[in-house]
Amino acid sequence: MQQSESGLIMESRSSRFPFPFQPYTIQESFMEALYTALDQGKVGIFESPTGTGKSLSLICGALTWLRDYEEQKKLEAARLLDGPEKKCDAVKEENSTSQPSEPDWVSEFVQKKAERDMVNKLKDEELKRKKREERLEMIRHNAQLRYAMKRKASEDDEAVKLLQLSREGAESETLNPEEEGLIVAEYESDDEATPKSRVCDEDDDEDLEEDHVTKIYYCSRTHSQLAQFVHEVQKSPYGAAVRLVNLGSRQNLCINPEVVRLGNVQMMNDRCLEMQKNKHEKQEKASDSETKRRRGVAKATCPFSGFENLMAMRDEVLVKVRDVEQLLQHGRETHTCPYYSTRMAIPAAQVVVLPYQSLLHASTRKASGIKLKDQIVIIDEAHNLTDTISAIHSAEISGAQFCRAHSQLSQYCERYRSRLKAKNLMYIKQILFVLEGLVRTLGGKVGQNPNTQSCQPGSELLTINDFLFKAQVDNINLFKVQKYFEKSMISHKLCGFVEKYEGSGVNTHSGSKNKENRRTEGLGRFLQTLQNKPTEQQMAVEDKPIMASPMMLVESFLFALTNSNKDGRVMIQRQECLSQSSLKFLLLNAAVHFAQIVQECRAVIIAGGTMQPVADFKEQLLFSAGVTEDRILEFSCGHVIPPVNILPIVLSAGPSGQQLEFTFQTRDTPQMMEETGRVLSNLCNIVPGGVVCFFPSYEYEKRILGHWESTGILQRLQSKKKIFQEPKKASQVEQVLSDYSKCIQRCSNAGSGQTGALLFSVVGGKMSEGINFSDDLGRCIVMVGMPYPNIKSPELQEKMAYLDKHMPHIGGKSPGKALIENLCMKAVNQSIGRAIRHRGDYACIVLCDHRYARSGTLQKLPEWIRSSTHTHTTFGPAFASVRRFFLEKRQRPPL
């Protein structure tokens, strides 16, 4: 055994887990527990603080299990194929001993049938495995060949030009009739049959239907976290061999300038799908031997979605691990869409990296070609998993969007009434009827400009059934309407319709109004009135672009209404103007959408740097989804830093003896705000580098900073630390952090009067998650009060009532009150975890509120912080311990 620099023991024995360096003991333990969870099909809850190599441990542990699993399957198949007779003899002997009274001819028949079935099954599996290996080998060979051809082609400019001209010529061979694609396919019945001319997102190809190999789906919260994970894979021992696919949205992976310039995610999706539909129809027309029809205006297709190029990039994606930026670069070089090529590579991939939404939303999974049956799912940064699932499956839509959707659909119905079959007309009229009812609940009417309709302000929270009764649409079968949306793709058809006609009243391609322009001028003008000339109030509240197809939002909202009555609520929010009023669906039971994942998958791993507290997490998400206690495996490890590198303090009183208690009744008093200023001023006198102070809300931050400015406290703080404040816009965060970091570095080098910087932030704000205050950027984290959520919020009250009714009462405490405490402590844990980011880091954490000293509250802190926490009832000893902590670090800095 050898001692590590941070005081932890590193094992000198060779590990069974390939690792880029000798792993720490906690990393070994993490990988062992992970391997066990995957092997036994568990639902694992893994907590490993940031800075302990969690991502690398996940990669090496999971891929080691996958390697062993595939080898075991291969050996088992070979053993059974080599000796099926021996296996069947054993079956025969077992049957003869267990059933002595059965006739011999019956036993022999059963045994021979079992033998034939077993051999056929094994041969089939072995054949599939060999074909898959041969195909992957061919992929690698073809990729090398293409690279060689690409180098050769680059030497011959003329060949490159000819290739480009031929590609462009192939793309523009045929043109389509102008409006053929806008008509919804005939909808003959309500059964499961697919409409006759279903629009596809991608080309039909047998490779898209190939069997999915056993794989690991890894998802995280942000694309930057996913990129970091991919980089860790590239550096790991498995980086050269693993087949990894990096999925993303069109906003992240699209390289078509015409689509990218739209900016808005929904508009980009609409435009891309429209182009794919045009491409699909173009191919159908090209293969049609009918008499040539009159050519209309050519429909735009995507030049980056050529089938051969997509297949080629799919193969290259499987050969080499690439992050999103590398995929984009490769796509631009090869003139190929990264979005669709990565989706086509999913079946053969061993690791699929994707955002939360793509995995946690069932319809998105289906659209992406993700199949979870018997696969592994790893959900990282999962501390807010329950809230994330609820947010993904909730929906909000404004009165303006409802009116716009109704206008578009009614104009579409009028335009193509003679072309629509009876079933289509029936369902379109049902959707229009539902939209009228929804707008009526907001106090408005369809067919009029929502910006000029006034409403009686107020809010109302209803169950799903009560809301449907109020809207007078309870007689409509929303399940059938939802199926119609899916089968007919009416939302996408409507998008193309609006794109074609919305501007026809003011702009024409020819410069003069032809007959068609005159016929649609009224339509275009009316559609435009629903988005032009917003009121001042609207401009102040809404800074989002109006989507081309609000019907997609309507579709999501109607789908949400198909949840069980007890699992959701609908909030009616009426403003003075109908356009600003909205309907919001709130999902109360996230487990209903998580159940399919835990039931289908072989194993599910839920990991995070801070998973505490986990009690409500298990009750609300796992147990409610049908997971039994014996299937749950919990793992939590400490930090790689030695205990002497962290000083967590619960501060119960300030310098003047004032008890620190930031309740709603006391926190606004001048005495409490001034005492808080004195605490912070004293800390700034002795803490080097950066101090990050978290307030419970933006409102309280504004109030207390205003008081400090009027009393001179802010000036005293400014004399020791330059003050920075969390910006209001997310786009400004990076600049503020850069200035904050430069100031700390400048102060440490110059030795001026200021000793660093003080950053004011808010719990749950832009700097409480995902920001690293490592080293001098965060030598002290100050938590002012306890950030309890607003208990008067109707949404939160409804959630509490739901939990009190459906969840067990543990320890005599109601689940609703436990939720409030757990939400508070989860936010605290995320904020204070910003300071310690690597094994050589050190920091002090000051929790300013005597309520943190309660045993139940302390238990909700991460164990590696809780075990070192000291409670001080007076300020003097606390101040002395902080001074001593930093004196020791200055005299003997940690290695």
Image (cartoon, grey):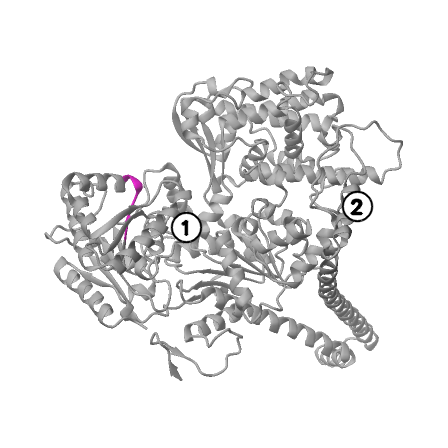
Identify the residue shown where x is 71% and y is 61%: 147
Whether residue 406 is situated above or below residue 314 in the rendered picture: above
Residue range (magenta): 692-699
Identify the residue shown where x is 58% and y is 67%: 239
| Residue annotated with mark 2 | 166
Quadrant of the rendering where the C terminus is positioned: bottom left
Q: Residues within 10 Å of mark 1 (few under 14, many from 20)?
A: some
Whether residue 762 is situated above or below residue 494 in the rendered picture: below
| Residue annotated with mark 1 | 807
Residue 695 lies within the magenta run:
yes
Residue 143 lies within the magenta run:
no
Q: Amino acid at mark 2?
A: Ser
Q: Amino acid at mark 1?
A: Met
Task: Name the one closer to the observer, 838 or 88.
Answer: 838
Identify the residue shown where x is 45% and y is 73%: 29
Dot 2 falls on a residue whose secondary structure is helix
Task: Name the one closer to the observer, 863 or 859.
Answer: 863
